[in-house]
Amino acid sequence: MKNLTLIVLIVTGITILTTVGCKEATKIGEELSTMPPTSEGEEVDVNNEENDQENVGTNGTSKSFCHGISEEIVTSTNSGKIITLSPSTAGYVNNGTLKTTLRAVISAAEEGSTILLADGTYTFIENGNYNGIYITKPGITIRSSSGDPEKVILDASYSDLGGETAPITVAAQSITIADITIKRSIFHLIHLWNGSDNVKIHNVHLIDGGEQFIKSSPGDTNRINGGSVTCSKFIMTPIGRQNVWGYGTQYGGTRCYTGGIDTHSTNSWQISDNYFEGIYCESSGGHPIHGKKRTDVAYVTYVGGLAEHAIHMWNSDAGTRHIIERNTIVNCARGIGLGLGSTLRIHGGIVRNNMIFSSHPGGSEHDVGIMLEGGADVQIYNNTLFFSHSNAYANAIEYRFSTTTGATISNNLTNKAIARRDSASGILTTNVTTASSSWFANLASGNLHLASCSIPELSESGSVIDTNAVDVDNELRDGLAPDIGADQCVEI
């Protein structure tokens, strides 16, 4: 909610009324998988596979929401065994007087243990063995002692951790990963395997994943239920973009096999209050610095490619639904995707109160903001999307294929079309697709909060979907007269 405060200045008897926005934009810029490759859509899963997060993705008062989750994590993990570690020499940690590895400590930890990481940078051994963290016991928590993700960094340094594995692989339920930074992986940064129900990823900074930053691939017949990713940052830097993993033969071209959150075979996930920036590949240029692995680099020719979405949920079973809300996505190749292709994969699902901005041209680098393909009864409402480039992709939101039925697309604010494609069906109400750049607080930074509460096209013009609805800042909307877009604007 963009609160606009009327300030009264009395100067030499003259009363001046001025409107001041009270919020600014947040800108930050055995492990060898035996699971069969997914057959979904057209993707090949080659693996088978600041201190407080006050303003991540929401630029406002949802800090209480994020703090609430943080407090819950701290409180809920104090009852089990606590193991405190600190960095040692490269690839090692100190566990009291014992010099060991993160993998060894976590593999030996009892069910329900909390691993507290002291401030510092933690690295991994690269010796041809499996050296990433591998969690197989339920209830394990990994978090920083300080609660500050910028002070505890797990740096994979583009090392080969064995078997095409991630710095953190999860194969157990009720795992919590919080308050740390994970960066510079050849493959995924966090990889979830079968059995990873109820995982919580909170207040984590994920930087420069060579593949998708968070990946779930339990196998087509299995499911990972009840996951949550909250109050976290997903950042691709220019150097990271040069290290994106490709696939295909090592003698062929490499494609842009990276993305933010990419889940196969999941149900009832909550993806909220996160910030995504820069997850795309250049359309041309030299090959990535390491190609697939450092040993492959001489054989790989980079031909560009469209990165995965910032958030992509491939499927969900009937009777379940994913909720994707209050996320901010800036200059990513694609924003939010549900399903892929014409096969019915998505049942239910809510996409609401997200802000998606791009300053790039459409084409091989940048594409649609919100995509629904092969989905039944999905609600897409009160999102704000703005593409500022003169040659931007033509559509902000697309719903596609005859298997997409019962879609509700309402109260969205965009400057590009909402497009029906390939015989999809849905109900569209009170969307505005003629947004002006002047309507927003700070377009250049991707802050799509409203600059004014006096935009007649938006103010109290939306359809009522939920009388108890909140906006992008987790503040209550007007239940009977909601604004259009992610930001409910109120003058106080």
Image: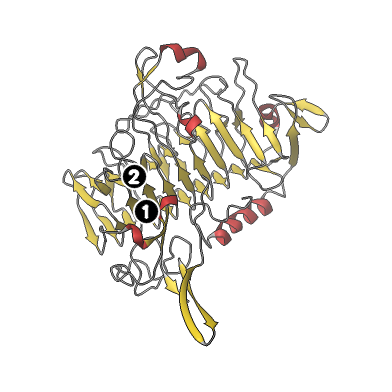
Name the foreground residue: 125 vs 401: 125
Residue 34 in the image: state x and y as whole percent.
Answer: 47, 23
Q: Are marks 2 and 1 in contact (CB under 8 Å)?
A: yes
The kind of residue on which mark 1 rests is Val
Residue 192 in the image: state x and y as whole percent.
Answer: 50, 35
* Residue 321 seen in the figure: no
Quadrant, the N terminus: bottom left
What's the residue at 56%, 42% (across, down)? 205
Q: Residue furthest bottom?
A: 13
Which secondary structure, mark 2?
Answer: strand
Which numbered dot is residue 262? none
How many numbered circles does the render carry?
Answer: 2
Q: Based on the displayed image, in which of its 4 quarters is residue 380 positioned?
A: bottom left
Name the foreground residue: 40 vs 284: 284
Q: Which residue is under mark 1?
A: 351
Which is more N-terminal, label 1 or label 2? 2
The kind of residue on which mark 2 rests is Leu
Which numbered dot is residue 338? 2
Which secondary structure, mark 1?
Answer: strand
Above or below: residue 286 compared with residue 389: above
What's the residue at 45%, 48% (across, down)? 269
Q: Residue furthest front?
A: 12
| Label 2 environment density (alpha carbons within 10 Å; few <14, some 14–19, many ≥20) | many
Above or below: residue 377 compared with residue 173: below
Instruction: Specify whether 87 is left or right of 41.
Output: right
Name the foreground residue: 404 vs 362: 362
What's the residue at 54%, 85% (across, down)? 12
Residue 412 in the image: state x and y as whole percent.
Answer: 31, 59
